[in-house]
Each structure stands twice: as C-alpha cells, then as structure tokens.
Amino acid sequence: MLEDLTAKLETALKRVRGQGKLTEKNISDSLKEIRRALLEADVNYKVVKQFIEDVQDKAMGGEVIRSVTPGQLIVKIVHDELVRLMGESQTDINVSGIPPTIVMLTGLQGSGKTTFAGKLATFLRKKGHRPFLVGADVYRPAAKKQLEVLAKSVNVPMYTSDSSDALQISKESIKKARENSCDVLILDTAGRLHIDQEMMRELERIKQELKPQEVLFIADGMTGQDAVNAAKQFLEILDFNGVVLTKMDGDARGGAALSIRAVTDRPIKFLSSGEKLDAIEPFHPDRMASRILGMGDVVSLVEKAQETIDVQKAEKLEKKLRKAEFTLEDFYDQIQQIKRMGPLDQILGMIPGLGKQLKGMPVDESAFTKVEAIINSMTPLERRKPNIINGSRRKRIASGSGNRVQDVNQLLNQFSQMKKMLKRMKKMKFRGMPNVGSLPFQ
C-alpha cells in the first residue's frame, strides 16, 4: 500500500537522520525531496504547499528533546502533519437511528461501489448488524447480477427489480428491508461521470426522498487527483458524509488518500483493498501515516489476528505446545488462520521495519497451497504421527498432492526441526499464536 511514496519519503528523510542538529539548510533539502515525492504521488499542489509550510514552521521552531535525535524529531513532525492532513482521528460510519439506517453509495463509474457494498455488508454483519443490499443501478446491465452474487456469497438479503426507475427501486427497498428485519440498508447506486447532470439529479432525488443517514463517496485510490476533483463535484451536489478509498492494494500513488480530506473536509471512513469481501478496514489517520513512513501498523495487525484466531483452538494449541505435542493437523490449522488475515505481503508490511526489508522481494503465497495439498493427501493417522510416513507413503502423498517426493521430504524435515525446537522451549510459557517457523519452499 503506497509503497512508492513510502520509499521516496524514506529517502528524503535520510538527509536529516544522523545529523547533529537541525539547520535551515538540511531541513530545506529534505523538504524539497518531500515536496517532490508528494507531487509525484499526485497530491493536490495546494495541499502540498500548506503541508511543507507547516512542517518547516514546526521543524525550525522546535527544540530537540533530550534522547531524541534531530532526525527522529523531523520524522515525528512529518508523521504528525500527515495525521492532521488525513483527519487526526478515526470516524465511524453512522448506523444509528430508526431502522433501517440507510447508507447510500455514490461515485464514478468503475470506482468499486458494488464490490464495496458486499464488503460493507460483511463488515456490518460482523459487528452484529443485519444488513440489506439494494441494487439501484439501472444502467449497468451486470450490476444487479453482480450484487446478487455478492449477497448470496455473504448470505445477506437483497432487493432489486426490473424497473428502470432507480428512485422507485430505492423507495420500495425500505419496506423490503423491514420485512426482512434488517437494520442497515446499503444502497448501491449507478456509477456516473460527474459531468452527467441528469444522472446527478437522480442522486439528488434519491437523497431527498430517502434521507439517508450516510452518503459515502467511493473513490478509486489509484486515480489520485482525478478522484479528488470528482469528490469536489459530488460534494457540491450531494454534500456526502464520508469517503471510501478502494483498490488500495494496487499501484496507488497516494494522492487521493493525502488530498481528499483536506480538499473536501469530509472524513475518510474506510479503506478497501483486493476482491475478497473481508478486505475492508476502518480508516485510521495515525495508522496510515505510520504505514506511509514505513513504521508498520502493529495495532491493525493485532486487530486482524483477534478477528481471525479461534480462541478455543488457540487454548488447545497452547496446551499441546506445553507438552510438545504439535502435529501436522495443528500446523494446517495455523496456515488457515494466517490466510484468513489477508494477503501475506500486506500482513508482513504491517510489521515495523519488515516491509522495507521485503521491498522488491516476492512473497510466494503458493507455498501455503503446496503445504496444504501435501497435508490433505495424508491420512488422519499420518498427520498425527508423521514418523510413520515411510518411503512408500511419501510416494503416495507426493502423487496424491501433485508434488515431488522431495517436497514431501522437505516439509517433513522442517516439521521435525520445529518439533525439536518446541521440545527445547517446553519450559517456556506460550501465549497467542505460535511461531510456526520459516515459510516452507522459499
């Protein structure tokens, strides 16, 4: 996420790291690099100008705290200004009031509204809500079908009709949501160009009639300044409550993330990345600033772990680890829990310092698939007692999993080494997820 901007900012801040003191010259040199990095990331030039002025004022006027180097001080100043630029604090989605609460999704064509509707339904259901999806896009032929597929995949009710009147569909959906005892109605409207006045008037009419508690502008995080310009146009007509940045796993330059709050004065409420329906997270300005500066995001990592780790399984596993009884079945379960946390490169990037070390290095998630196939080709007894796997069994497992005997040997050898390590650590207290060792087949 925003790897290119992160790399350029790190290069710029190197100029003052290690310096004995902050001077007008080394601050100026660093700020020139920061300005260039932000402009290349397609951040609004007025936002960049103000940001640089604010950092410079604080850097030149600040005193270096004892035990804090000048380099650390300016990194902190840049971090704090990034947080201020993106909103200072996290803003929750408003789903209060008489049900159903109406959340209206708007934005340009191709910004990812329909996919986000499914993600938001998944997110709200985890929070204990009963979401209801509504397909009000009467222009894109596949939109209603796409939403139907998403609704079925997350087991959420939805409503649409063959009517060409988006307002009528929207009004009818409120009654349908109540019939299904749903408390949050997510309205997926048609994507449009901001210059299409007729389609914009349709959005106005829907908002006036339904009076949604939340109107969210869905912005494509890959489009940079174009997303900001579109947001300004939508804001003038709809006065939306918040922003969602989508496609943040792509080659996002960062312009939208850093500009849109300052230009619209509306909070960013969610980040969306990838196609999986759980790839959504509330936007935290301080965490995003840390990611941009290569500091990682431990809090989000812990939250992901808490969401995906089965507490009962973790407790059983802890008891097994205390007795050094870790099996291949346990190892398989750990792989499943790690995979549920999201793409491995994103998870590793949240660990402070590790994202920078992994830059440019491929993270091969297919290694998990290979391990899963090998373990799935074993009998339950073989998974519990790998020591019984002789030569003929290894050939059968390799053939059944579509791998080589050498791959089976490698997994068994690594697992054996892990067991030996656990025995040496038997007297130590284990807490939470264990270190399952190095990733196989790297």
Image (cartoon, helix red, strand yellow):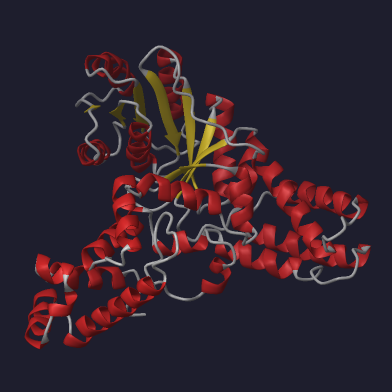
Q: Which one is in front, 190 or 312?
A: 312
Question: How far across and down, in percent of the image, does residue 32 sit?
Answer: 80, 63
Residue closer to the observer: 52 or 302:
302
Q: Is residue 359 visible?
A: no
**So how many labels did they put on this image?**
0
The answer to whether residue 131 is left or right of residue 216 is: left
In the figure, is residue 315 to the left or right of 71? left
Q: Residue at x 16, y 69 (%)?
A: 383
Residue 100 lies, with reference to residue 342, above or below; the image says above
Q: Is residue 56 left or right of residue 224?
A: right
- Kindly identify the residue that appears in the image at 22 percent across and 42 percent down: 153
Q: Which residue is at a point 17% across and 85% down the rendered structure image?
A: 404
**Residue 328 occupies which quadrant of the picture?**
bottom left
Q: Position of residue 64 (x, y in %)?
A: 88, 57
Does 412 appear above or below 100? below
Residue 220 in sight here = yes
Compared to residue 182, the image places residue 370 above or below, namely below
Between 178 and 317, the one nearer to me in the picture = 317
Residue 433 picture location, percent across and down:
39, 57
Q: Residue at x 59, y 66 (%)?
A: 353
Q: Is residue 231 left or right of residue 437?
A: right
Against 296, residue 139 (above or below) is above
Q: Position of residue 440 (x, y in %)?
A: 33, 76
Q: The C terminus is located in which quarter? A: bottom left
